[in-house]
Image (tube, grey):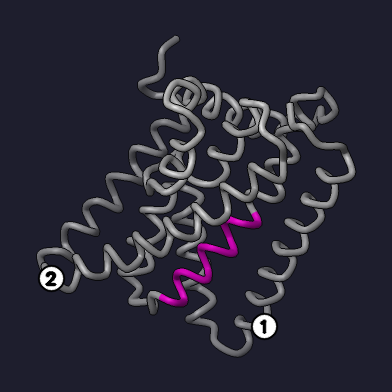
C-alpha cells in the first residue's frame, strides 16, 4: 500500500486526467490543421495500447515520424497513463472502485505487477528502473509503478523512479531503433514490420488468455 494519503493520490490522478484532456485537444486541433499527422499520432498511441513501447516505436518508424516527435508523444502518453491508472490501481486495491469493466482492467494490470514483483524484490529496487526501461509488452512505467506500489514504496518515490526511467527508455529505443533502421536499410524495414506484427499478435493472444496457465 502506498505510504501516502488520499489527497496525493487524487492530485496525481487529476494531473493525469489533465494530460489526457490536453492530448485530446491537440488531436482535435490537428484534425482541422493536419489530419494526416493526427492519424499518425493515433496510430502510435494505438500501437502502444496493443503492443507496448516497442510496437509504438516501430509503428512510428514505419510512418516516418521524426524521432523527437515520437519521443514527445510517447513520453506524454505514458506519463498520463501512469498518473491516471496508478492511483486507480491503489484505490481499487482499497476496494473503493467497483465498476465492472474498469475493475477488470485494473485487476489484470495489477496481476501483471504481482507476477513481476518478486523479481524486483529479489534483486533490489535498483532493478525497477531497468525493468521500466525495457521496451517489451507488459513492462514500462505503469507496470513498474504498480510493482513499486506492491512493494510499499511511497507514491512520490514511485513516480520519481518511473517517469525518468520511462523517458530515458523511450529516448534510448527511439534512437536505437532509428540507428538500426539506418544501418540495415530495406532489410531492417522488413524486419521491423515483421517484428511489429509479431508483437501485436503476441499481445492480442495474451490479452485473450491464450498460453496462460489455468
Which numbered disc covers residue 183?
2
Which secondary structure class fits the magenta region best? helix
Q: Which mark is residue 133?
A: none
Using a 10 Å C-alpha cutoff, classify the residue at mark 2 as few (fewer than 14 neighbours), some (14 to 19) or many (20 or more). Answer: few
Above or below — where is 189 with respect to 94?
below
Which residue is at 46% across, 29% downward? 208
| Residue 29, disc | 1
Horizontal side, residue 17 vs residue 39: left or right? right
The span shown in magenta is 68-80
How far is the residue under mark 1 from the one under mark 2? 36 Å
Residue sitting nearer the eye, 193 or 70: 70
Verify CB contact (< 8 Å) between mark 1 and mark 2: no
Measuring 76% from the left and 29% from the top, which residue is drawn there? Answer: 92
Which tag is nearer the camera, tag 1 or tag 2? 2
- Out of 37 and 10, give the one closest to the viewer: 10
Whether 57 is drawn above or below 204: the answer is below
Amino acid at each position: 500500500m502506498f505510504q501516502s494519503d488520499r489527497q496525493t493520490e487524487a492530485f496525481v490522478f487529476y494531473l493525469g486526467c489533465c494530460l489526457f484532456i490536453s492530448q485530446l485537444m491537440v488531436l482535435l486541433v490537428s484534425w482541422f490543421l493536419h489530419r494526416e499527422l493526427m492519424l499518425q499520432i493515433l496510430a502510435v498511441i494505438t500501437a502502444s495500447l496493443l503492443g507496448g513501447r516497442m510496437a509504438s516505436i516501430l509503428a512510428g518508424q514505419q510512418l516516418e515520424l521524426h524521432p523527437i516527435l515520437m519521443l514527445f508523444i510517447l513520453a506524454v502518453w505514458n506519463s498520463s497513463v501512469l498518473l491516471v491508472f496508478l492511483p486507480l490501481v491503489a484505490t481499487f486495491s482499497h476496494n473503493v472502485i467497483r465498476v465492472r469493466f474498469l475493475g477488470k482492467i485494473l485487476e489484470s494490470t495489477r496481476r501483471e505487477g504481482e507476477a513481476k514483483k518478486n523479481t524486483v524484490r529479489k534483486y533490489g529496487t535498483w532493478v525497477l528502473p531497468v525493468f521500466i526501461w525495457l521496451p517489451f509488452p507488459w513492462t514500462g512505467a505503469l507496470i513498474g509503478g504498480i510493482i513499486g506500489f506492491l512493494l510499499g514504496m511511497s507514491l512520490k518515490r514511485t513516480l520519481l523512479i518511473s517517469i525518468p526511467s520511462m523517458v530515458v527508455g523511450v529516448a534510448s529505443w527511439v534512437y536505437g531503433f532509428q540507428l538500426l533502421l539506418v544501418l540495415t536499410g530495406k532489410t531492417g524495414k522488413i524486419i521491423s514490420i515483421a517484428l511489429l506484427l509479431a508483437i501485436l499478435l503476441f499481445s492480442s493472444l495474451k490479452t485473450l488468455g491464450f498460453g496462460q496457465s489455468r
